[in-house]
Image: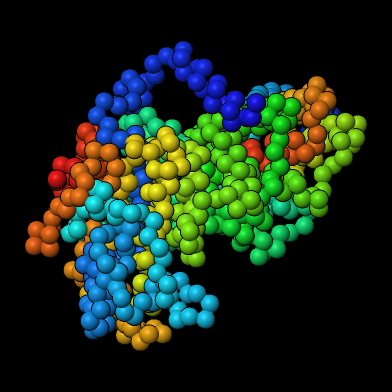
Amino acid sequence: MNMPTFKRLIPVLLVGLAMGSCTEEKYTYGVNDVIVQPTDLSGKKSKTPEQYLNILYANLNQRAMSANQLVKATDVITSIGDKQVAYETVISKFMNDPDIILPSEESMRNDPESFVKETYQRFFVRVPTEAEKTWMINFINSNPDVTPEHVYYAFAIANEYYFY
Amino acid sequence: MKRRDFIKKTALATGAITVPYILPTGRLFAQTGSQKAEHVVFVLFAGGVRHQESILQRYLAESQDLDIEGNIMYNMLTGDAPELKVVYGTTPAGQQPGIQPISRILQTPLDQQGTLFPEVRFSKAGTGHFVGLSTGVSGHYGVTQGLRQRPINPTIFEYLRRFGGAKATDVWFVGNGIGNSTPLLNHSEHPDFGYKYAANFFAPNITFGSKGVEFLKGFKVYHPDEELVPIREMQAFLNNSFNLAGKEIPHLYNTDEEKADIKDFIRATFERLENNQVSFPPVTDNGDLSTIGYTTEILRWFKPKLTVVNMSSVDSCHGSYTSYLKSLHRGDHAVGHLWNFIQTQVPEMKDNTIMIIMPEHGRNYEPNPITDENDWFAFDHDSDPNSRRIFTQMVGPNVPANLRVGSEANPVGDAADTVLTIADILGIKQDVLATGLVDFNAMSLFDRI
């Protein structure tokens, strides 16, 4: 090809390149099937009595239990065969402690959503699902006699609290 | 109406219209046809009891080279007490330690009221406490049984709940403490039995001792309708969200009513303690005696079909023979008090209870080098032939009175026999035998008479 012929083809080539660079690619997105469970708990381990009592005390009193108290409380749990009975009894004894720090009923009633979120975070170390949040808020709103103590007690004796 | 009365009356009312139910074995109703008694109390007279100071009544004669014999267990055995070197009693002010023997409780010793097997053998495995206790409650020598491990084969509690239809509060194991894996004896790790059929357990010296006072006494009681109903509703919702099989707080399949009853019992026992109403033995100066005192409270409240209570103070014999004698004497006092309590304070169990008493194992014939304040030698238990010599005593309805079965030349009975004996009394012997999980030489002691 001689030089004049090449020069004549240059505009044609430039137009072709310009048109090619404007071609728009189209993407299609899909969603994989996922089995939805309330919470992924498959790796959970049970707490030892020491862990359970230590965390419970910290959750309720917002300070650590002394080592001496922890040993004694653990012995008491060990001395009762049915651990559900043992834990429920010890927790209800804790609830009689004047040093326990509970949210006020007013704050729970004024902002149940925050209360529910904070309670899940405090006891289960996670955020509630929408369904859990809705159910708990409805329950609190429809049961005017329920107090923060009742809610805390229910969370403390729930199976999920026994696992981490 | 009190909550407990309400539960009782409700149970009576519903009992009238109850429908037949199928036990886990597939049987309709529990077997009840051949019961010898409706209640059994099994005293694990444990800690390692030397045959010479118990059955043989040799006191200091076959241990310390002193020619002084006598019976320091006169509630259980017939025989005169020692007259010299009395150290096993209480100590009146200003007098020699242990000089005052504890008064007898039973006018007729148990060996005259019932049957004594004076030469029973702990025939297999090492003579260790936990293996011995495990054998006593499971009828199986756990030769490989380790501490911190539940019995390998099912316990009598599990047999009774599974085959006899007993509910959880019908079966109790009362421990003298929480050491030596004692709390693990209320059920086995056998896959076909286990915690679903376990006995309820208390180590009452802790539950109701200073630790219990700090962490249990005065626990809050929620109103059963106004407070507990919404709490349980929230708990159920939270548990439903946490729906992984087997992921639950360990429990013994007490019903909600039984759990409430146990809590009521805990609260009532603290109140009775405060008012000095707990039926402790007349002399209560060691852990075994207070354990027996709390056991009487369990009998009074629950009237269990089966109660197993564990004692252990005689194990001080490792370091003090004098302390051992005191504990042996107090063990006898405890047993006398327990039997007297059943016959006089629990009408539902009077004349309807068979009590079985058996040490878990014996002690060595030769002493160790340790001497005590009286320069008397101490004794261990490390599987010598003497530490395999034990006894078993039975008393109650359908038990022949004033009968001795066996002798040193002709030993009769085995430590593994107790489970089948209890099963025989409560009408489930064939079911237990059919499992093939008790020692192959074990028999009901009634079949050995």
Q: Is residue B308 visible to the viewer in this orientation of the structure?
A: no
Q: Residue at x 20, y 43 (%)?
A: B400
Q: Residue at x 39, y 32 (%)?
A: B166
> Residue B341 at what x, y percent from top left?
43, 47
> Residue B37 at what x, y percent from top left?
30, 35
> Where is residue A65, by image quadrant?
bottom right
Which quarter of the image is occupied by the N terminus of chain B? top right
Q: Residue at x 75, y 42 (%)?
A: A121
**In the foreground, B110 or A97:** B110
Q: Is residue A106 visible to the viewer in this orientation of the structure?
A: yes
**In the foreground, B320 or B138:** B320
Residue furthest to the bottom: B375
> Residue A74 at what x, y percent from top left?
59, 56
Which quarter of the image is occupied by the C terminus of chain B? top left
> Residue B107 at what x, y percent from top left?
33, 54
**In the foreground, B309 or B292:** B292
> Is B197 above or below relative to A70?
above
Q: In the figure, is residue B357 to the left or right of A15?
A: left
Q: Residue at x 39, y 43 (%)?
A: B343
